[in-house]
Amino acid sequence: MTISARILPAAGLAFALAAAVPAGAGPAVLVDLGTGKVLEEEDAFAPWYPASLTKLMTTFVLFRAIKAGEITLQSPVRISERAAKEPPSKMGYKPGSVLTVDNAIKILMVKSANDVATAVAESLTGSRAEFAKRMNAEAARLGMSGSHFFNPHGWHADEQTVTARDLAILAMAMRNEFPEYRHYYSIEAIVSGKTLMENHNDLILRFQGADGMKTGYTCPSGFNLIATATRGGRSLLAVVLGESSVEARADKAANMLARGFGLPGDDAPYLGQLRPSGKEPASAVNLRPVICTSEHWKAVTEARGPEGKPVYTSPHLSKEPLREPQVIAVALGGATGPKPDVPEYADVPTPTPRPDYTPEAMAQGG
């Protein structure tokens, strides 16, 4: 029997979120990856800003280019002047630096670096605009009818929106079309020089069986998470959008996955059978007035206590990491693969608006 988790009607979502971000208010989808059946959904067709979940599509475009023979995992990704000036989260590589596609993907999945995302786009197609055309072409091929991409990193743009249903389609396609690359989604930490960067996906080290995939955060989007987990040979996918904190998105995803493993899903609809309710808002809700305020971050900080550790409410998340993270090294250099023959565009950075209030610990990206 399908569980409908429609805690808020879609038509009332904008009003409710403008006042506060109640638990579980954002769009969400829970899918059995083995069958493609939807075990839970709420506002699956509501438009939303994807933040760094965008980088899943960026990576998918790379995988498709590798399959087409345009590049390999060892092809060069060059940091341009424009890429180097992207806002955080970023690696801070100097213009002219070169890394491999392989290391770029690892950085996108863990650090969620905007400079590397732009460098990937420019290195493959010559410009962010040309890369966005590929992103939208892939979205159309997959049937992501409610999504439009404008940039490769997810820094806020009004033109860039997705739906929870579409993100589930993308995540399933990545796993099914390219199973050889699944290891990228479960990387626990990377190290560059002396800098250790742990995965922002809190489920990776706190939820039994967690094995991917990606986080995202901006002020307008709130805290987003696509999480996968496998238990007893069964794999589930949870898409959680618009939560109020790192802990809130982890709690909701963990609870959804735990419920899902207890459901047979025999009578559940397939993901492709979902249809809009007709009550979805015309545009994405902008959470900036709720998320990026001093009052909100004061409440989040106080909840974490004097040590600043995250506090989870889900009984399915371990209070402490289940183990020390396994660390993978990334570095510049080593690019020996073919370089795409693309036109060289002038590196003329465009202004990027900064949030009205962004705590240092919550720079965009995770």
Image (cartoon, rainbow, N blue to C red):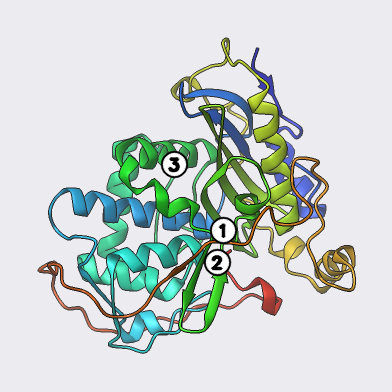
Q: CA distance from mark 3 to mark 1?
A: 14 Å
Q: CA distance from mark 2 to mark 1?
A: 5 Å
Q: Nearer the viewer, residue 213 or 210?
A: 210
Q: Which mark is residue 226?
A: none
| On screen, residue 353 above or below 200 | below
Q: CA distance from mark 2 to mark 3?
A: 18 Å
Q: Which residue is mark 3?
A: 171
Q: Secondary structure at mark 2?
A: loop
Quadrant of the rendered structure where residue 23 is?
top right
Q: Residue 316: tell me if it is visible.
A: yes
| Disc 2 residue crowd, few under 14, some 14–19, many 20+, Cα 10 Å | many
Q: Secondary structure at mark 1?
A: strand
The reply to whether the C-beta atoms of the residues labelled 2 and 3 are less than 8 Å apart is no
Residue 280 point in image, percent of width and height: 60, 35
Quadrant of the rendered structure where residue 97 is?
bottom left
| On screen, residue 256 above or below 68 | above
Residue 216 point in image, percent of width and height: 56, 58
Q: Which residue is mark 1?
A: 216
Q: Which mark is residue 365?
A: 2
Q: Amino acid at mark 2?
A: Gly
Q: Nearer the viewer, residue 143 or 37?
A: 37
Q: Amino acid at mark 3?
A: Ala
Of the numbered discs 2 and 1, the one sitting upstream in the chain is 1
Q: Amino acid at mark 1?
A: Gly
| Disc 1 residue crowd, few under 14, some 14–19, many 20+, Cα 10 Å | many
Q: Residue 151: tell me if it is visible.
A: no
